Image: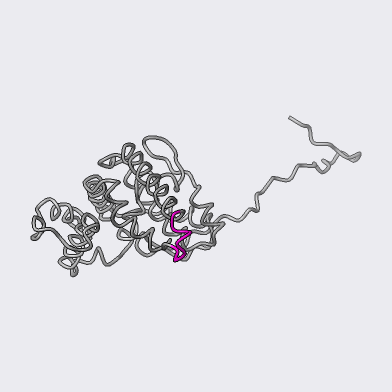
Amino acid sequence: MTEQPRRSNGQFGEVSRDEATVSLAPVPAVPPGSFLYPPILRNADDAIAFWEQEEIPDEVLNKCRAMYVAQFQATVDYGPEEMWEGPIGARYDEEHPMPSDPTAQEAWREERERYGAQYVNGLRETLRGRPEFLDPRDVRQLAKVVGYIGTAMTLPREEGDRLREHGVELTTGRFTVREINTNYGLFAIGEYLRDPDRYDEAKRDERLTMAVAAVVNVALAHQSGQIREEFGNVNDNVRQTAQIVIDTA
């Protein structure tokens, strides 16, 4: 213990003390909001602060599990090759139309074939590593990843990319938002999961009709919208798959 110094008159003198270190770094203020109605977030730090503290309702979690199972089964049933020959290939052709110059068409075909093989092999590999069902302990984190991705799309490019590299803990380890979004195919369900209308009881019948149509359209898009005779009345498996999407609403 340091003895306090005394002056010549016997009185105690002043003691020099180091000033306490105080961090003046701003702490991100978490604005009010919810999963379906998030606040305006301007950067990655604010987005992380919001989504890390946001409590996701069980209704959203149940729907997340159900929609994941539905899209996983539809993708498996349809198959990577059919996906490329159907909706994915059609989207490629729309975004990369065949050139009118005959001398450039062969190169276009080769590039399309190369891209298609890459897509099919990549999707097949992804499906091998993707669980058929979600671990209940992961569902809350996966729903938050859906929130991260939705927010990232509203941010400036640099901030959005930074948010996509944020790490999220799952039962299998820690992965970036980008990795989880790709590995679990969350981009296929995110838009629907974030849509408030899908939680409106008054629209239950409408959602069922749309869900059935969505599953049928994805599964049969390569038939140019013409549903074959055996699917004329929408078979039970397709209807059950669509029902999974909304039966927790």
Q: Residue furthest right?
A: 8
Q: In terms of image quadrants, where is residue 243?
A: bottom left
- Magenta stretch encompasses residue 182: no
Residue plotted at (25% across, 52% down): 67
Residue plotted at (48% across, 56% down): 47
Q: Report the front residue among 155 and 222.
A: 222
Residue plotted at (40% across, 56% down): 147
Q: How many marks?
A: 0
Q: Quadrant of the N terminus?
A: top right
Residue plotted at (11% across, 57% down): 231
Q: Position of residue 76 (x, y in %)?
A: 24, 44
Instruction: Give the colour scheme of this rendering.
Output: one colour
Q: Position of residue 156 (x, y in %)?
A: 54, 62
Q: Residue furthest front?
A: 103
Q: Residue furthest top?
A: 1
Q: In terms of image quadrants, where is residue 200?
A: bottom left
Q: Position of residue 186 (x, y in %)?
A: 35, 51
Q: Which residues are magenta?
A: 99-106
- Magenta stretch encompasses residue 103: yes
Instruction: Assign the magenta stretch its main secondary structure.
Output: helix
Q: Is residue 109 left or right of residue 18?
A: left
Q: Position of residue 34 (x, y in %)?
A: 37, 61
Q: Is residue 194 left or right of residue 167?
A: left
Q: Report the front residue among 148 and 235.
A: 235
Q: Quadrant of the C terminus?
A: bottom left
Q: Is the residue 80 above or below the residue 243 in the image?
A: above
Q: Is the residue 14 above or below the residue 218 in the image?
A: above
